[in-house]
Amino acid sequence: MTSSPLRAGSWAPVHGALAASLPPSAELAHWRALFDEIGAGSSERERERILPFAQVKLLKQARFGALRLTAADGGAGASFRQLYHLTLELAAVDANVAHIFRNHFTVAEQFARHPYDARSRQWQTAVRSGAVFGLASSEAGSNPAGGFAPDTRLLPEGDRFRLEGVKYYSTGTLFGDSMLVRAATPDGRVAAVIIPTGREGIEIVDDWDGAGQRLTASGTTRFHGVRVEADEAVFDTPERGYGLAYSNTQAQLFLTTVVAGIAKGALTDAVALVQRRKRSFYYAPTPVPADDPLLHEAIGRLAANAFAAEAIILSAADAIDRASEARERGETAEDLSAEAAKVAAQAKLVIDDLALKSASLLFDVGGASATERAANLDRHWRNARTIASHNPSSYKAKAIGALLVTGEPLPSKGFF
């Protein structure tokens, strides 16, 4: 049998329809073995706030971040369907580690997958070798989030620039080799600045204080006169990067995929909890919890939620693949991109609810002892709730309703 392009750490060419399918079972088992290693101790790490540097290093060595590079460029040639399927499996064992890669895949897709100059070819080479991008885009100021000129300044200085400013929500940047920073010049031009995270003048602070996703290092990054070479600043155009309509759809579905993985992780923990329980309630129908039909019913609901969440993710991924493949053929793909954005928004509306219900239902199979801090089972609800809060469902639902009733297009910038 021809080797799959999705084996961790070494790629083979993509053949036939494989690029649009799920990973073959043998290769999925290979990735799951790696994910199981990463998932070992994930609850304890989160409870004790132990950042997952070792686990991210394993994924770098396996070149997980190169999945979307074409086979000709030394990558896996993975479709979005394949990428999100593997990401869901990873999130099921460690939602923090999976979330760390969200910004990497966004930056790599926009600025490294199809190089357009010498610098972007360097970025692609780095991705192929396993390097990871971080992101410092959002700010804590009063400007609306998404699609607006940032306060972070890109100041001309001879034939290069200097970067000054402060960012928040710098998810994954502490683990990254390079980072993308959104900044604006004094005359209002907005750029994506891609620079090494270790460059002089960059200060990355792990001060994220959210209820969930505690190990993503989604904190503050400060720039103190950081040197930026001219070709490290990519200014927005309608054809490239953040200037492209619906450039954030991929990132939005990635977050929702992590939430779907949380639903699967809650199911796994619930099954293990029922299997190991020794005591039951005095009014339970059976003395042994594993024989209790009410607990079986709860597990069944958790399983259905996880199944539905995964099916929705894969369907939405197909929509992004259709838009991506059209752009690969040189087509504008505006309608397909808008459809992908709508599908991704609808996926979020449903999957957020499914995961939060599952994370709560988990406690119905464990009783009061399941709420002990040592068990840390509340991490599933906290993590799902934190990710779901990034871009509130109410705005997504309103936009979809307006589209269907009045024909008002979805926002093409920001969080769509």
Image (cartoon, grey):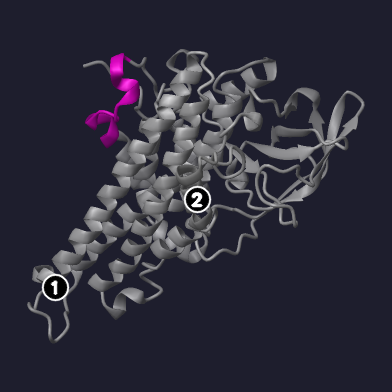
Dividing the picture into quadrants, the one containing residue 296 is bottom left
Check disc 1 and report its element: helix, strand or loop: helix
- Is 105 situated above or below 95? above
Of the residues shown, which amino acid type is indicated by label 1? Pro
Q: Which mark is residue 96?
A: none
Is residue 18 rendered magenta in the image? yes
Q: Quick check: 266 left or right of 241?
A: left
Foreground: disc 2 or disc 1: 2
Q: Is the C terminus in the top left, top right, bottom left or bottom right quadrant?
A: top right
x 76%, y 39%: residue:
183
Q: Are marks 2 and 1 in contact (CB under 8 Å)?
A: no
Check disc 2 and report its element: helix, strand or loop: helix
Q: Which mark is residue 396?
A: 2
Tell me where residue 166 appears, x and y as whole percent. 76, 50
Secondary structure, magenta segment, majority class: helix
Characterize the local packing of mark 1: few (<14), some (14-19) or many (20 or more) Cα atoms within 10 angstroms.
many
Residue 380 appears in the figure:
yes
Q: CA distance from mark 2 to mark 1?
A: 41 Å
Q: Which mark is residue 289?
A: 1
Of the residues shown, which amino acid type is indicated by label 2? Lys
x 88%, y 37%: residue:
186
Decide which of 114, 35 is in the foreground and name it: 114
- Give the mark nearer the N terminus: 2 vs 1: 1
Tell me where residue 134 appears, x and y as whole percent. 61, 40
Characterize the local packing of mark 2: few (<14), some (14-19) or many (20 or more) Cα atoms within 10 angstroms.
many
x 65%, y 45%: residue:
146
Stretch in magenta: 15-29
Decide which of 137, 57 is in the foreground and name it: 137
Q: Work out which residue is located at the far bottom of the displayed protein and give it.
A: 282
Q: Quick check: 82 left or right of 74?
A: left
Tell me where residue 383 appears, x and y as whole percent. 45, 59
Q: Quick check: 347 left or right of 292?
A: right
